[in-house]
Image: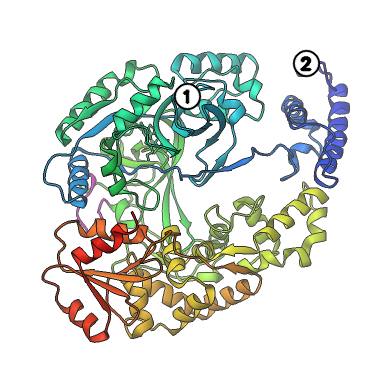
């Protein structure tokens, strides 16, 4: 179908081909989805889809109402297979200044209770995308992108086209997962963009996007035409250790044929790390590929193991970022957005400007004080210069975060009027109230405010929450506007109420409606931690959702405890507050949520629709403390408090900050005081530091 190149099509031919494509692709979708018997393969389908898009781009007036480009969620080749990482792929904490680097080193040594220096590696932070490649018996088995860290996309066929990734390795462990960064060199990037432009395709905005777009190509033959490179810098699952040091392990990977970065250096002090940072920064412009900082890693792998990780970042590594690029532009207007928790967030609408390769037209202005030139404590920022509509401002981007404003040029100011922050919600008109101690004003409309309602629903379906395939922010907004969905429970009754209407909506059709409804059904069963996070309780993020879930384990127990809890008193409050990582502010917010009628009812209606899976503490094998609640008190002499806590959690224990009837074990170091007395009076088992170390040594 369609051999004539798109530029040479007459209008009549284009119209006929679009009609054919629509009918043919609809049949293909039906064969794929309904009959589970595809009549064309994914690559052929993609080629048709691309052809359809190209013709539509050439003849926008001919785009059909039933065009395949408008059908939602009906693309058979809409994705790669998923691969679960045996060892999660972590991200890195950031350092922005020399002081942050010194602090990192101090933190590491404190955790390890070391006074002597720790040795680190320093290496460039490559600005690409990370990849995990698994070898079994020396043969490349599969390659997966990072994804959400737990589960990535299967890009095996594409990885074979990346230089620096061998297909076979010798003298390797039977199971070897090599991790590193896929990137595109500047010369390759420029050549690719020239080809894109010559073919009438959109050029890529930077090498990182080009690398990501090329690796994540469903058609591996396209990847093959895009020169990608790889640096190995880490590993995942291994059947045996590679070495006993970071640099030793990297050297072994280099011997096996992986590309490794030549600027990696061993450093014996934070000062040496900073020297290497400056050296790498000096070479940055001539490297021929993009880097955005320097990564420091503890070199001794035994120490890395002891340091372990926080929920998504290791304690033994940090990324020292290069300062963000900036650009000057005009601030055209200040808009107010209302967020999920009612916060009124001012947004700067900017005259579009390129900052570090990306076009920026919005920047956050944080809050009222920030616009006035004051920080959260009332001290001046930007020497107290305020920001007004019409001002010339300096914009910067740090990594993927929303652009920010660094400074304002008073010499170009024309507007005599300082900005006045609204006293009412611009969406629903309710009073905007700023409570003492809160940096932002909040709309008091709660669920009656359309903006809050919408944002809460968007949060509900977000990736870390319910993550319903095909139900993103845009669809949620459409359903809210139609009046089909007003609260989370409505999503699960959508099928009964509007299933038929959905299939008849423009741009939908039977197949995409069924896909969405099936995706919703698939999420009726949800783990407790995700449910808690999805509720959008103020101060409860993804990690806190997990902490709460691991503590209460079942929805019934969690709900009962929150309803029983009264702020600042009683056993249920004590237990909630005793969870390590839950502070008073979060505890009060959760209790308040369950004691407010509107949110309580919303939750009741939702829970009726769901099957909620219990969350168990992490599997700790033969751990003697799995599922037990521990409290550490007094000073420990052999290991730091932080390390003791991390060990206990790693063995499946809950670590609490206060002793109660629920405490199973108190580990009392020297000079233990009131907690020891309380434990004794409650008959809680008390261990000395040595007894604790002996107990956990059994698990090694
Ligand atoms: S180490 C457990 N080393 O930066 C630590 N990461 O911001 C795993 N990255 O997800 C990462 N260059 O994609 C490491 N030399 C390097 C890196 C590097 C780039 C990326 C990686 C990671 C992200 C974290």
Q: Is residue 187 left or right of residue 653?
A: right
- Please provide percent x and percent y for residue 7: 75, 16
On the question of residue 376 being in view, the answer is: no
On the question of residue 461 being in view, the answer is: yes
Q: Mark 2 to mark 1: distance in Å?
A: 29 Å
Provide the residue designation for mark 1.
207
Q: Which residues are magenta?
A: 373-382
Tell whether position 377 is magenta: yes
Q: Residue 443's image quarter?
A: bottom left
- Please provide percent x and percent y for residue 459: 53, 58
Quadrant of ligand 1: it is top left
Q: Quadrant of the N terminus?
A: top right
Residue contact at pointers 2 and 1, CB within 8 angstroms:
no
Tag on residue 531?
Answer: none
- The residue sitting at 33% across, 79% down in the picture is 574
Q: What is the tally of numbered marks visible in this picture?
A: 2
Q: Which residue is nearer to you in this view: 402 or 400?
A: 400
Q: Of marks 2 and 1, which one's residue comes earlier in the chain? A: 2
Provide the residue designation for mark 2.
5
How crowded pointer 1 is (Cα within 10 Å; few <14, some 14-19, many 20+) is rated as: many
Dot 1: element: helix
**Above or below for 598 versus 511:** below
- Please provide percent x and percent y for residue 69: 74, 37
Q: Is residue 272 left or right of residue 656?
A: left
Q: Residue 447's image quarter?
A: bottom right
Tell whether position 439 is magenta: no
Q: Which residue is nearer to you in this view: 681 or 242?
A: 242
How crowded pointer 2 is (Cα within 10 Å; few <14, some 14-19, many 20+) is rated as: few
Q: Nearer the viewer, mark 2 or mark 1?
A: 1
**Above or below for 663 versus 11:** below
- The residue sitting at 33% across, 74% down in the picture is 577
Dot 2: element: loop
């Amino acid at each position: 179908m369609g051999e004539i190149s798109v530029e040479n099509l007459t209008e009549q031919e284009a119209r006929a081909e679009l009609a054919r494509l629509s009918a043919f692709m609809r049949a293909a979708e039906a064969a794929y989805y309904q009959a589970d018997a595809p009549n064309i393969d994914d690559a052929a389908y993609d080629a048709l889809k691309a052809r359809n898009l190209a013709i539509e781009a050439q003849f926008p007036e001919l785009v059909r109402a039933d065009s395949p480009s408008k059908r939602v969620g009906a693309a058979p080749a809409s994705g790669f297979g998923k691969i679960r990482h045996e060892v999660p792929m972590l991200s890195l904490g950031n350092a922005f200044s020399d002081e942050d680097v010194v602090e990192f080193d101090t933190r590491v040594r404190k955790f390890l209770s070391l006074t002597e220096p720790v040795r680190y590696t320093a290496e460039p932070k490559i600005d690409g995308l990370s990849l995990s490649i698994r070898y079994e018996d020396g043969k490349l088995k599969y390659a997966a992108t990072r994804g959400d860290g737990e589960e990535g996309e299967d890009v095996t066929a594409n990885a074979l086209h990346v230089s620096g990734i061998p297909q076979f390795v010798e003298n390797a462990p039977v199971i070897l997962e090599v991790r590193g960064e896929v990137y595109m060199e500047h010369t390759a990037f420029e050549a690719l963009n020239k080809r894109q432009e010559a073919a009438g395709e959109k050029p890529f905005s930077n090498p990182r996007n080009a690398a990501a777009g090329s690796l994540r190509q469903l058609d591996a033959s396209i990847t093959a035409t895009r020169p990608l490179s790889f640096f190995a810098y880490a590993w995942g699952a291994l059947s045996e250790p590679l070495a006993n040091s970071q640099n030793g392990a990297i050297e072994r990977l280099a011997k096996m044929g992986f590309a490794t970065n030549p600027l990696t250096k061993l450093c014996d002090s934070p000062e040496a790390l900073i020297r290497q940072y400056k050296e790498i920064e000096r070479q940055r412009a001539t490297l021929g590929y993009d880097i955005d900082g320097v990564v420091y890693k503890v070199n001794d792998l035994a120490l890395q193991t002891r340091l372990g990780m926080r929920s998504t970042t290791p304690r033994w590594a940090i990324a020292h970022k290069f300062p963000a690029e900036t650009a000057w532009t005009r601030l055209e207007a200040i808009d107010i957005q209302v967020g999920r928790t009612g916060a009124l967030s001012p947004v700067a609408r900017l005259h579009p400007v390129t900052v570090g390769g990306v076009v920026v037209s919005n920047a956050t202005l944080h809050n009222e004080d920030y616009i006035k030139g004051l920080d959260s404590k009332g001290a001046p920022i930007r020497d107290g210069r305020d920001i007004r509509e019409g001002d010339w401002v300096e914009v910067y981007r740090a990594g993927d975060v929303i652009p920010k404003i660094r400074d304002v040029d008073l010499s170009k100011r024309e507007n005599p009027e300082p900005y006045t922050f609204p006293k009412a919600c611009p969406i629903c008109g309710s009073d905007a109230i700023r409570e003492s101690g809160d940096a932002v004003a909040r709309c008091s409309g709660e669920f009656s405010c359309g903006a809050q309602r919408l944002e809460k629903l968007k949060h509900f379906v977000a990736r870390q929450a319910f993550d319903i395939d095909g139900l993103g922010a845009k669809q949620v907004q459409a359903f809210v506007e139609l009046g089909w969905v007003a609260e989370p429970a409505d999503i699960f009754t959508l099928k009964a109420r509007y299933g038929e209407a959905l299939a008849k909506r423009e741009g939908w059709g039977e197949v995409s409606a069924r896909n969405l409804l099936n995706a919703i059904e698939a999420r009726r069963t949800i783990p407790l931690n995700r449910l808690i996070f999805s509720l959008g309780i103020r101060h409860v993020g993804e990690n806190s959702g997990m902490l709460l879930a691991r503590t209460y384990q079942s929805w019934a127990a969690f709900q009962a405890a929150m309803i029983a809890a009264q702020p600042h008193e009683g056993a249920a409050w004590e237990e909630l507050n005793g969870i390590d990582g839950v502070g008073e502010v979060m505890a009060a917010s959760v209790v308040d949520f369950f004691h407010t009628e509107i949110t309580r009812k919303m939750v009741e209606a939702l829970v009726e629709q769901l099957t909620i899976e219990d969350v168990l503490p992490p599997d700790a094998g033969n751990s003697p403390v799995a599922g037990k609640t521990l409290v550490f008190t007094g000073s420990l002499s052999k290991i730091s408090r932080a390390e003791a806590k991390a060990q206990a959690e790693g063995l499946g224990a809950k670590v609490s900050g206060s002793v109660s009837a629920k405490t199973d074990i108190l580990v009392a170091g020297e000079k233990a005081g009131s907690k020891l007395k309380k434990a004794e009076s409650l008959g809680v088992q008390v261990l000395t530091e040595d007894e604790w170390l002996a107990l956990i040594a059994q698990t090694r």
